[in-house]
Amino acid sequence: MDATDKEILKNIQEDFPLAETPFADVARRLDLSETELISRIAALKEAGVIRRVGAVLDAKSLGVATVLCAARVDQERIEEVAGIVSSFRQVTHNYQRDGDYNLWFTVWGKDEQDLERTVGEIEAQAAVWVTRLPAVKTYKIRAVFDLT
């Protein structure tokens, strides 16, 4: 990753334009061609530096319910259970952690009953017990990385 890639990342994290030609607009700001910008972003995505380019939505303001979940999964079943969890379209995040609760994921639904139905299906299919950790208060943080 060179200095130009770092400038690209800096520019698209918070100030990606909502415009007819957003990549051309960013390219102009960075004195690049649109083709070069798109090619560099694709390479950063391929390298795993960028996971996705898109909007971050606030579930609560959209009327969507969410819950953070944690499960204790035997190490020899972690890949199997993670695959089952990830197969649900209502799961937005799914990751392994160290510790007793070693599989964590986030589920969304239309309401609390919808959440419970989905988590119950996950428990049944994966044969694991899931701890639900509903948010009591939301603290929004700004995750912006200045790499320059």
Image (cartoon, rainbow, N blue to C red):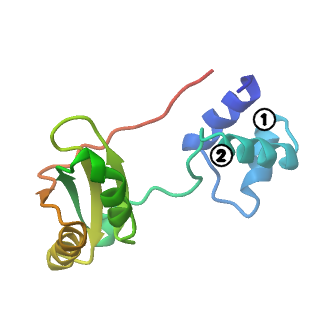
Answer above or below: position of 73 versus 9. below
* Residue 133, disc: none
> How many numbered discs?
2
Amino acid beneath label 2: Lys
Q: Earlier in the sequence, mark 2 or mark 1?
A: 1
Q: Amino acid at mark 1?
A: Leu
Reading the image, the residue beneath label 2 is 45
Mark 2 and mark 1: Cα distance apart in space:
19 Å
On the question of residue 64 being in view, the answer is: no
Expressed as whole percent of the image width and height from the top left, the position of residue 47 reads 66, 39
Q: Quadrant of residue 68?
A: bottom left
88 sits to left or right of 2: left
> Dot 2: within a 10 Å radius of its alpha carbon, few (fewer than 14), some, or many (20 or more) residues?
some
Residue 30 image position (x, y, % from top left): 78, 35
User: Residue at the location (55% across, 26% down)?
Assistant: 146
Percent of width and height locating residue 78: 31, 51
Question: Is 44 positioned to the left or the right of 93 in the image?
Answer: right
**Residue sitting at x 40%, y 37%:** 142
| Residue topped by disc 1 | 30
The residue at the point 75 percent across, 52 percent down is 23
Q: Is residue 56 left or right of residue 106?
A: right
SS for dot 2? helix
Mark 2 and 1 residues: CB-CB less than 8 Å, in contact? Answer: no
Q: Quadrant of residue 92?
A: bottom left
Q: Nearer the viewer, residue 123 or 54?
A: 123
Given this view, does label 2 or label 1 mark the residue nearer the observer?
2
Disc 1, SS: helix
Q: Which one is nearer the viewer's eye here, 123 or 36?
A: 123
Picture coordinates of residue 14 (x, y %)?
Answer: 54, 42
Is residue 141 in view? yes
Q: Residues within 10 Å of mark 1 (few under 14, many from 20)?
A: some
